[in-house]
Amino acid sequence: MISKTRVTKETDITIALDLNGTGKSNINTGVGFLDHMLESFSKHSLIDLNIECKGDTHIDDHHSVEDIGIVLGALLSEAIYPVRNMERFGSANIVMDEACVSCDLDLSNRPYLVYEVDVVGKVGQFDLELVEEFFKAFVLNAKISAHIVALRGKNKHHIVEASFKALAVALRRATTKNERVGIPSTKDVL
């Protein structure tokens, strides 16, 4: 398990991650909906996660959500690079009742996010605009390319949760061990 701490005037975050775990998690972000999404992410990626965050949620959840994405992405980058003996590419379509979200990703060491998930408003007290902020921070700091696209859905909770699960399953598939691929690039480096 590797860990990282980030302390700013807005947040105090410690995250521990085991890329080759079993999907166990202990998550306390101070943002209930985000806890639920990250527990789901851990379960379906099979990445063990311990996350503690003390943030300025009396202002709003933005700093906590974005900074957790930063730290989690940086830890994932540390765990996967240099990419060797991993599949590199992963994809998943995840269904939650009426919702279906697709995630395709590349452990490219070149961060890029395509985010086509049109959810606005709130789920409970959680501002849904923060979902994109989380994914953006995560992808940029993990140095992966990810396309997260909602194919259909009406229930905002289902769409967002399917997004986190799609990322998790695609990441699990991309990080699958495969000794035959060596460095999965014609450049011989990622």
Image: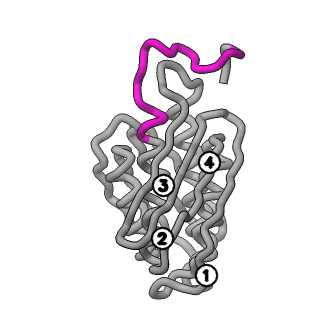
**Label 3 element class:** strand
**Residue 29 seen anywhere in this rendered image of the structure:** no
Give the mark, 1 or 2, whose residue is nearer the N terminus: 1
Q: Nearer the viewer, residue 54 or 149?
A: 149
- Tell me where residue 137 sits by quadrant: bottom right
C-alpha separation, residue under disc 3 versus residue under disc 1:
29 Å
Which residue is disc 4 drawn over?
146
Residue 161 percent coordinates (x, y): 43, 67
In reply to whether residue 28 is colored magenta, the answer given is no
Give the mark, 3 or 2, whose residue is nearer the N terminus: 3
Disc sitting over residue 181 in the figure: none
C-alpha separation, residue under disc 4 versus residue under disc 3:
24 Å
Disc sitting over residue 159 in the figure: 2
Residue drawn 59% across and 24% down? Answer: 82
Residue 50 percent coordinates (x, y): 38, 53
* Amino acid at pointer 3: Thr
- Tell me where residue 150 sits by quadrant: bottom right
Indicate which label's residue lies in the foreground, 3 or 2. Answer: 2
